[in-house]
């Protein structure tokens, strides 16, 4: 499947314009931290390894879905989603993947899959995740995750948008024949055509009808049941989606519904453009060439106090630290005053919000010279 899906492994060095926000994440940047088990106690319902940060090894090519604990296949050798990591190599690294430029929404890792092939080909990949414990029948939950198509590269075969992506909850993993579409009816449909260079938040509420233990996301049903549109490129052959930050929680607001009519989500999805977040922004690339434009990397924040801002190389070496509100930012120099090498760096920040709560964030920045 991946020989076809990524026939061209040529990467095109372009500037990614994706605006990425990230959630709570603490890490020392050495590969050994990735090698840990998920068999630990958890508090409340969770999506296991929902941000793909736990890996048994760093990905070095596409199709290495078996490196991601907590995520399952569909029983088909042709269903091979992809794991990507900032510290990965070859086709498994970030932000430059074989299909698009993309930085994680959260942390240092994401996943990707071919939602559909070209119209009429009826080719599919699906991602299947698991819960920390079976859902409680009759209980209302809110399910949230993030998705993007990334910034398409010049030689990418991606560029299609697709409608009616769906979420199917089940007690056992679904089984797929080759790369054929699954025929199950999803409990949730994202009806409009999805295509976005930015991270979008997809969130919906539903009532569990059984003690579901897993969920599957993708395009259910045949191509003729949906719209497949050309959004970028001359002749793209697939709709490729990146996903990150899967979360589930009991819906505290409650859901007033007739239990006899409940078949899954009881509200339409909420699509939030992260561009509209007024309190937090970090660029994901800068060019410290002293031309007066985009020379400094610095967070932009509203109604929070900056407590810590640090930048690390991919190998864990701290190259910059700011511990006050003096908005000098990182000018692309090492601590010795030398020009830092072009490439991907990792930032970490701690801020204090208006209520006195400390919030920690981390993500990737690309230095371009």
Image (tube, grey):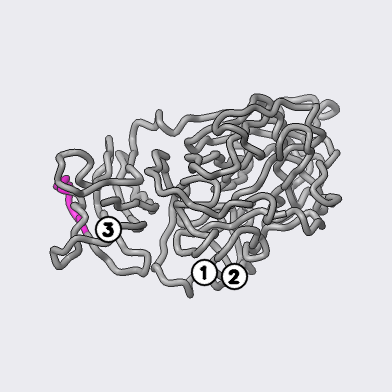
Q: Secondary structure at mark 1?
A: helix
Q: Secondary structure at mark 3?
A: strand
Q: Which residue is mark 1?
A: 34
Question: Could you tell me which residue is drawn at 51 percent across and 45 percent down?
Answer: 100
* Residue 131 visible, this angle: no
x and y percent of residue 198 in the render? 47, 36
User: Distance of mark 3 from mark 1, alpha carbons?
Assistant: 21 Å
Residue nearest the viewer, comparing 122 with 359:
122
Earlier along the polypeptide chain: callout 1 or callout 2? 1
For residue 302, which quarter of the picture?
Answer: top left
Most extreme residue toward the bottom is 32
In this rendering, position of residue 43 left or right of residue 22: right
Q: Which residue is mark 3?
A: 310
As drawn, the label of residue 61 is none
Question: Could you tell me which residue is drawn at 15 percent across and 48 percent down?
Answer: 328
In this rendering, position of residue 253 left or right of residue 20: right
- Please provide the residue range marked out in magenta: 321-328
Q: Which residue is mark 2?
A: 56
User: Distance of mark 2 from mark 3, alpha carbons?
Assistant: 27 Å
Contact? badges 1 and 2 (CB < 8 Å): yes
Q: Is residue 360 magenta?
A: no
Q: Is residue 327 magenta?
A: yes
Q: Secondary structure at mark 2?
A: loop
Contact? badges 3 and 1 (CB < 8 Å): no
Earlier along the polypeptide chain: callout 2 or callout 3? 2
Q: Main secondary structure of the magenta part?
A: loop
């Amino acid at each position: 499947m991946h020989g076809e899906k990524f026939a061209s492994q040529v990467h095109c060095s372009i500037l990614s314009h994706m605006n990425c926000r990230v959630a709570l994440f603490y890490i020392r940047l050495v590969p050994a931290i990735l090698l840990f088990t998920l068999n630990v106690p958890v508090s409340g319902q969770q999506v296991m390894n929902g941000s793909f940060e736990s890996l048994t090894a760093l990905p070095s090519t596409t199709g290495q879905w078996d490196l991601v604990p907590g995520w399952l296949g569909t029983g088909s050798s042709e269903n091979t989603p992809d794991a990507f990591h900032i510290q990965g190599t070859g086709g498994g690294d970030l932000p430059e993947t074989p299909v698009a430029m993309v930085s994680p929404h959260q942390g240092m890792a994401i996943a990707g899959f071919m939602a559909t092939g070209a119209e009429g080909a009826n080719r599919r990949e699906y991602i299947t995740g698991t819960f920390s414990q079976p859902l409680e029948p009759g209980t209302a939950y809110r399910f949230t995750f993030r998705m993007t198509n990334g910034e398409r590269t010049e030689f990418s075969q991606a560029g299609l948008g697709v409608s009616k992506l769906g979420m199917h909850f089940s007690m056992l993993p679904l089984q797929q024949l080759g790369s054929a579409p699954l025929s199950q009816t999803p409990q949730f449909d994202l009806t409009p055509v999805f295509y976005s260079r930015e991270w979008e938040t997809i969130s919906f509420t539903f009532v569990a009808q059984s003690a579901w233990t897993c969920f599957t996301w993708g395009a259910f049903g045949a191509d003729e049941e949906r719209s497949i549109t050309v959004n970028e490129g001359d002749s793209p052959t697939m709709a490729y989606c990146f996903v990150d930050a899967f979360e589930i929680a009991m819906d505290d607001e409650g859901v007033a519904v007739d239990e006899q009519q409940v078949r899954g989500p009881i509200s339409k999805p909420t699509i939030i453009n992260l561009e509209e977040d007024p309190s937090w922004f970090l660029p994901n690339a800068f060019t410290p060439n002293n031309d007066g434009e985009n020379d400094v990397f610095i967070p932009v924040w509203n109604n929070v106090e900056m407590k810590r801002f640090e930048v690390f190389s991919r190998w864990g070496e701290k190259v910059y630290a700011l511990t006050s509100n003096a908005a000098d930012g990182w000018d692309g120099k090492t601590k010795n005053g030398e020009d830092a090498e072009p490439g991907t760096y990792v930032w970490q920040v701690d801020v204090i919000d208006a209520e006195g709560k400390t919030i920690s964030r981390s993500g990737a920045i690309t230095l371009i010279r």
